[in-house]
Amino acid sequence: MRCREQRNGTYWSQNQNQGNAETFHQSKVWVTAEERSFMTERAELTGLSLFTYLRGVGLNKPVCSVLDLKAVADLVKLNGDLGRMAGLRKLWLAETWSGRSFFRGGGHDT
C-alpha cells in the first residue's frame, strides 16, 4: 500500500476539494480516558494529529508511521557507509598487492 501525500497534517489526493463547495459534518465519539490516551499514543507514533489519524483509520486509509520513514532513512545512510567501507577495503587490497602503501605515506609514483 502506498501512503498518500500529507499536507498540513491531513491526507490529500488530487481530486480532493477542487473548487467544489463540500458540506462538512462534525462527528463526536465518547471514549474513556484510557482509550483516548491509547489513540493519542498511536497518533503520535505515526506523526499525525489525533484527528487526522482517526479520520484515516476510520476511512480505512493506509496510515504511514514516521518511525518507518526514519528507519528507511537510517538504512540509506548505512548503505552509503557500507559502500565507502567497501571502497576503502578495495583500495587497501589493491595497494597491498601492488607493494605501495597509500595509508603509510608511500603514495603513488609521480
Image (spheres, rainbow, N blue to C red):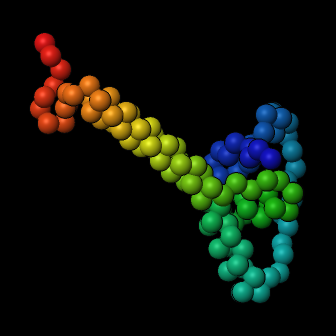
Can you tell which quarter of the image residue 53 is in? bottom right
Image coordinates for residue 9, horizontal then vertical, percent = 65, 52
Residue 66 in view, yes or no: no
Q: Residue 28's x, y, as percent?
A: 83, 72
Nearer the observer, 90 or 33: 90
Q: Nearer the viewer, residue 25 or 104?
A: 104
Q: Residue at x 50, y 51 (%)?
A: 74
92 sits left or right of 101 in the view: right
Tell me: residue 100, above or below residue 33: above
Q: How many marks?
A: 0
Residue 82 location, quadrant: top left
In which quadrant of the rendered image does the C terminus lie?
Answer: top left
User: Residue drawn 72% across and 86% down?
Assistant: 34
Residue 58 drawn above or below residue 99 = below
Tell me what residue is drawn at x 65 percent, y 74 percent: 41
> Quadrant of the rendered structure where residue 59 is?
bottom right
Residue 70 picture location, percent across and down: 55, 54
Q: Is residue 2 above or below residue 109?
A: below
Viewer-closest of 108 and 3 = 108
Asked whether residue 45 appears in the rendered view, the answer is yes
Q: Position of residue 49 (x, y in %)?
A: 65, 62
